[in-house]
Image (cartoon, rainbow, N blue to C red):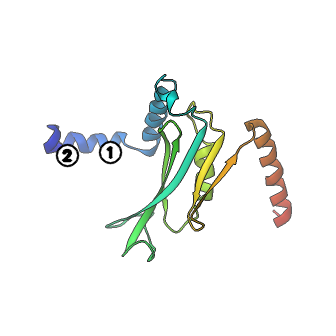
Amino acid sequence: MAASCGIAYGVLAWTAEWYLREETLREADVCLVNYHHPLPMIAMFGSGTLSSSDGQRFPTRGKSITARHLNKYFVSEGISTYTHVSDQHSTFGTKVIVATHREAHYVLDEILGNATDLALAEYLVHAGHAACLYSWRMPPRRSWRRMWRWLSGRRRRSFGG
């Protein structure tokens, strides 16, 4: 990359080391989605209330904390990425996860932790093993929080925690 852009390798390496972290990339992504969302032309694609999520698996080389052996997908080790896209074609979340983990809690974490201006109300999620899409509408956040507290208390009682 240094040879193609005319910037010294040391400067690029220093910039990547100090500024390319998950927190800074997430903040930049939120800024881009928030700028993109109110543009008049973008409203032609959708209202920003629909989200689609799907995972992809990639093989890796070398050592990685998140890479795992999964013979169905990789010759050796690999990782999964889960990406969330709005109906306005803006990516509001991407997460690298361990390939052997179930994706459901990562999906909920990304949807409920959404810091963009998108007023997401409906979610399409690919259910890998079932090879189909599940769609659901979330109630308003206030009633959802009330429901979550109820479910959390119920789970604690059920398992004696």
Q: Find the distance from the CA under tag 2 to the CA under tag 1.
A: 15 Å
In the rendered image, residue 109, in percent from the top left (x then y), is placed at 61, 49
**Mark whose residue sits in front, 2 or 1:** 2
Query: Is the residue marked by circle 2 packed among few (<14), some (14-19), or many (20+) residues within 10 Å?
Result: few
Image position, residue 126 (x, y; %): 57, 57
Tell whether 7 sits left or right of 34.
left
Mark 1 surroundings: few (<14), some (14-19) or many (≥20) residues within 10 A? few
Question: Which label is found at residue 1?
Answer: 2
Q: Residue furthest top?
A: 40
| Residue at position x 13%, y 44% in the image | 3
Question: Element under label 2?
Answer: loop
Residue under the image location 65 percent in, 51 percent down: 135
Vertical arrangement, residue 98 with respect to residue 89, above or below? below
Tag 2: amino acid: Met
* Residue 83 locus on image (x, y percent): 49, 50
Q: Please name the amino acid that badge 1 sits on.
A: Glu
Decide: is 148 above or below 36: below
Residue ID at (19%, 43%): 10
Residue located 84% across and 57% down the image = 154
Query: Pointer 1: what residue?
Result: 17
